[in-house]
Amino acid sequence: MHMRRHFLLIAILALTAAVLLTPGVASANYAVHGGYAMNTDACAGCHRAHTAASPITWEDGNGATQSALLISTAATTDQFCYTCHGTAMLGADTNVYDGVYEADDGPDPADAVNSFGEPLNAGGFNPSMFPTVHYPNDTQWVAYGAGPDGRDGIISTGGEQVVIGCSVCHDVHGSSNYRLLKDMVTGINPTTGAQQGIPVGGYDPASPDPQNPIPTPWVISAEAGYPTGGWLLHDPGAAQMAGYTPDYTDPMYAKPPGSDVTKGISAWCAACHTQYNTEGTAGNYADEVYDANDGFGLVERHRHPVNVALANFAGPRSLVVTDNPLPLAHDGNGDVATNELTDWMDCLTCHVAHGSGAKMTGYAAVADATDPQPDSSYGVTPGDGLGSVPPDDGNALLRTDNRGVCEVCHNK
């Protein structure tokens, strides 16, 4: 990402001029990002059919390398995305690099004040603000908890590496899912550990209208007016956007369609992190025996449940607390005012998707689980509060410092 600003300076004039001529570019699944009519002008917002300068390529169904025909001279997809979604860029209000929404996102439920520059729900990628990020810019990395026993995500075992970048998770041309999350992810086969396409949404091939097939989303939203049936593929956009109010700064997460425990954001994430959404016998979420490089050696590994209602774990006192509540998955549009025992805990309850500024100090920063010395810090300078027991190698994209995400629910 250190070359980002260099490429932005080269690319910004051509691309910004193009996108500013394209109406509604800030809305996901609309304008340049989907809902294309047959006479769409949106293609010209990013592509040039005969004079594209960017060296970015893609691989077709036959494995052949093709030019993406993109405007600008950006060398990676992420650099190209930052020409709209970066610092001080005019093409979109969602500045994912700095993790802020640069427009007025309306009244904040916390303080009822109209404000600009509120933090994005997913965090950001600026390393000076977010010391742990989801490895953007076409970086090769491992997916923790991947493969048949979950050990493929451990660096020391030589796990299967995947390329991480904007287009790995998001489909810039639109999808059936929330926030352009792809309907097919190049993830990790849970049985073999090899990379393969994992379906995590899509469109019904048996739809009566093949030009506008029925969406089958895995990930939806509780935002006001959100089309919970998924985004249509070729609708020009106006009908789908009518009544819909995107909210980029207040968590508006929803249970999957039909409250299907095999879907939702947790199952979507599990396309790469294959074992994190696998329930074992009697509700015990456990991997097979493997060495996580944390000092315990070859032992069975256990995980916190996901895609589960809080009522499943109701005890002598409520798990729902009102002091700094974490975002849960709710029913229906706009049903996020209060947390209920029927709401679900999923991946985004504890983690952010892009980058986290949470600090790991004290016992949360130990390097060796068998010898938990506070502030020993794994993989970084001792005492700087950015380490922890492997394999998370940082703050694990947690929402709050140390293990504050645990205390919000467990209230000990």
Image: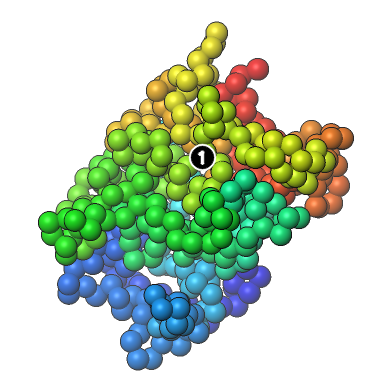
- Tag count in the figure? 1
Q: Residue at x 61, y 34 (%)?
A: 286
Q: Residue at x 53, y 72 (%)?
A: 79
List the residue tagged with mark 1: 277
Q: Residue 56: in sight, yes or no?
A: yes
In the image, is 258 to the left or to the right of 275?
left
The residue lying furthest to the top in this view is 316
Instruction: From the top left corner, tell me how far across and down residue 164 is, in percent.
Output: 56, 62
Residue 101: give x, y in percent of width and height.
46, 52
Element on which disc 1 rests: loop
- Image coordinates of residue 214 in percent, x first then y, are 21, 53
Q: Eyeballing the image, is 235 above or below 149?
A: below
> Looking at the picture, which amino acid does disc 1 mark?
Asn
x and y, in percent, of residue 237 in the image: 21, 59
Front in this rendered view, residue 173 or 45: 173
Q: Quadrant of residue 296?
A: top right
At x 30% / y 35%, what residue is drawn? 258
Which residue is the extreme one toward the left? 208
For the N terminus, the quadrant is bottom right
